[in-house]
Image (tube, helix red, strand yellow):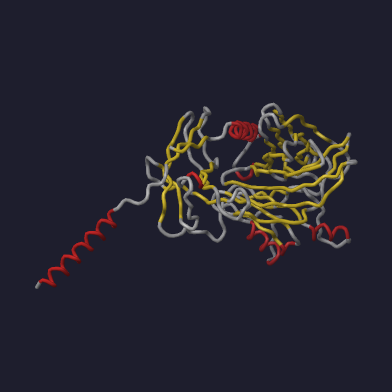
Amino acid sequence: MKVTRNKNFIYLVLACLVAAACTQKPEALPKFMVTNDLNMDRSFETVEIKLKDIKSEGETLDTSKNYTIIDAETKKEQVSQLSDTDGDGTPDVLLFQPEIKANSTKTYEVVLKEGQSHKDTIPSCYSRFVPERTDDYAWENNRVAFRTYGPVAQKMIEENVPGGTLSSGIDAWLKRVDYPIINRWYKKELETEGTYHEDTGEGLDNFHVGSSRGVGGIAVKVDTTYSFSKNFTKWKTLETGPIRTSFWLDYAPWQAGDKTISERKYISLDYGSNLSKFVIEVTGTDEVSVGLTSHEKDGEISTQVNQGWVSYWEPHGDSEIGTGIVAAEGTMTAYDNYITNKTDQSNLFVQLGVADGRVTYYAGFGWKKSGQFTTKESWNAYLKDFAQKINNPLKVSKL
């Protein structure tokens, strides 16, 4: 009987320990306050929470776990994405897009969710190299899509092989659905009798780029001449996801007068944005020109260089389209509506100063037929608000 009592006592102690462990609260993770200082409601703007701020100093964050964000008041989970912003192969920030009223703050919590995040086959923000269509690189989100061209397409032109493209301009793919279309359109073009040059309900590719700057390609002006690179030579996809896709493109050194220019583009596109972000690493010049193609030269130009934006609104097929460039206050110094009889060389340029070997700007478009922007005024209002927001970003502070 004595032995039985001892066994029962041990079982009771173990049961109490297990019960205590099960009722322990999970490890407390920090809260963050997001502040909107502008007199406008904010949404579809990506903020970053540094992963090093989630743990105490000296502790290691387990990035294999599913960290996510919830609204501290409603407890509603926010769409989020781990991102490697410094290119070392390890995530360093957690991205999400809060909705915050004008002149207000909201509090969010970081939580550890059971299991791994579900990953869609094709996320909302998506990009990839496209070897099956020569060697394009294409990217998209829920509102817009773009592409540009690689070295095989350039070689085909240089060797007089049909089907090549010689351009470092940025092409606009005019989608009017919120789901991914890149893979669908390439398959339609290459594997069926259909073509992405015709709109069957999702949009189409009828935006001519040629050797123009398209929507945000760069040039360097020497005297009165604009010079620019050929096709990209190397590429790397950095991330795709529900919030952001990003990648880089390298270009062979090129000449602008007696200047030798080197160029690498870091490009990203966030959910809900009509504008891609371009960070250009450049040497050989202290000023870069960013262009919007003028096509038939019948568009309407709007410029607010002091606010950091320019717009080109033009007839386009059976609809209209607005293109635009936005940059941080003080970085855009001038604009030039460059008109010439040379094919594809007429562009609306803005001049941006190079600082510490970099130029940063945003460029994109709004197609009237998509229903996103139906007038020049609505497109210009979007660019104006976008400029205000990048100059007054949402502030994140750890509580």
**In the displayed structure image, the side of residue 272 where residue 279 appears, left or right:** right
**Quadrant (top left/top right/bottom left/bottom right) for the N terminus:** bottom left
**In the displayed structure image, the side of residue 335 where residue 142 appears, left or right:** left
- Image vertical order of residue 221 relative to residue 21, above or below: above
Q: In the image, residue 360 lies at what x, y percent? A: 69, 39
**Quadrant (top left/top right/bottom left/bottom right) for the C terminus:** top left
Q: In the image, residue 240 lies at what x, y percent? A: 59, 54
Write the residue at 52% across / 30% down. 40
Write the residue at 45% across / 33% down. 105
Q: Residue furthest right?
A: 258
Write the residue at 59% across / 46% down. 270
Write the residue at 85% across / 39% down. 226
**In the displayed structure image, the side of residue 74 where residue 185 appears, left or right:** right
Q: In the image, residue 98 lies at what x, y percent? A: 49, 41
- Residue 19 versus residue 327: which sits nearer the camera? 19
Residue 36 visible in the shown view = yes
Q: Residue furthest front?
A: 2
- Image vertical order of residue 368 relative to residue 120, above or below: above
Q: In the image, residue 216 lies at what x, y percent? A: 73, 42
- Residue 11 versus residue 311: which sits nearer the camera? 11
